[in-house]
Image (cartoon, rainbow, N blue to C red):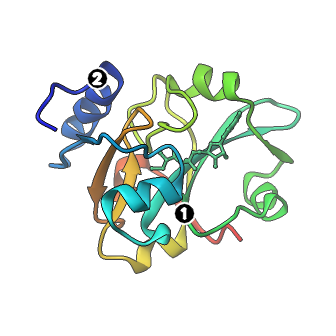
Amino acid sequence: MNQPLSESARKVQAALQALGLPCQVVELPASTRTAPEAAQAVGCQVGQIVKSLVFRTQTSRRAVLVLVSGSNRVNEDRLAEVVGEAVVKAEADFVREQSGFAVGGVPPVGHHRPLPTYIDQDLLQYAEVWAAAGTPHAVFKLNPRELPRITGGEVIKVN
Ligand code: 5CA
């Protein structure tokens, strides 16, 4: 566990540092690719895992990032109302192109271009949550109250 971080995880660690968040990215031997796997790997509730889901607006093809509690599903009609346009779940190559990270490791910060972000209000009930840090084995723990500040995101009801 004291191995140097992979390049993608280092990018996220650097972004957190630049945002003034003293969080330590950890790379685990176990998979953290999905919310249940991540919860198992770190020993928390699935709801405490931050899923960083990329959506694409249907006509203008813009990326929208939604940070979702691991136990919730996004209601796309509700999201469309907030965004002002129909949205679809992004394809894997669009996710990588827009965020700079592959599905399964998309972090809430550190993307190679800024992504408009929405935050699931249910994440705020927890004292701490875990988010992906660039790879399907890398995560970091934070107070969910930091999420609006570090992402510039708006807290919404997603489901
Ligand atoms: N590392 C974990 C949590 S810390 C993680 O990244 N979870 S996640 O939920 O944010 O990312 C997995 C999500 O990627 C899935 O919920 C799904 O929405 C999306 N996904 C999985 N496969 C694909 C695919 N082929 N194309 C686009 N999105 C996908």
Quadrant of res 5: top left
Mark closer to the chain start, 2 or 1: 2
Q: Quadrant of ligand 1?
A: top right
Contact, mark 2 vs mark 1 (Cβ under 8 Å) = no
Query: What number of labels is visible?
Result: 2
Q: Is mark 1 within 8 Å of ligand 1?
A: yes
Q: CA distance from mark 2 to mark 1?
A: 24 Å
Within 10 Å of disc 2 (Cα), the crowding (few <14, some 14-19, many 20+) is few
**Quadrant containing the N terminus in the rendered view:** top left
Q: Tag on residue 58?
A: none
- The image position of residue 104, as x and y in percent, is 53, 38
- Residue 22, placed above or below residue 104: below
Q: Which residue is mark 1?
A: 70
Within 10 Å of disc 1 (Cα), the crowding (few <14, some 14-19, many 20+) is many
Quadrant of res 65: top right
- The image position of residue 138, as x and y in percent, is 34, 39
Q: Which residue is mark 2?
A: 6
- Residue 23, placed above or below residue 81: above
- The image position of residue 95, as x and y in percent, is 63, 29
Q: Amino acid at mark 1?
A: Gly
Residue at x-position 23% and y-position 42%? 26
Q: Amino acid at mark 2?
A: Ser
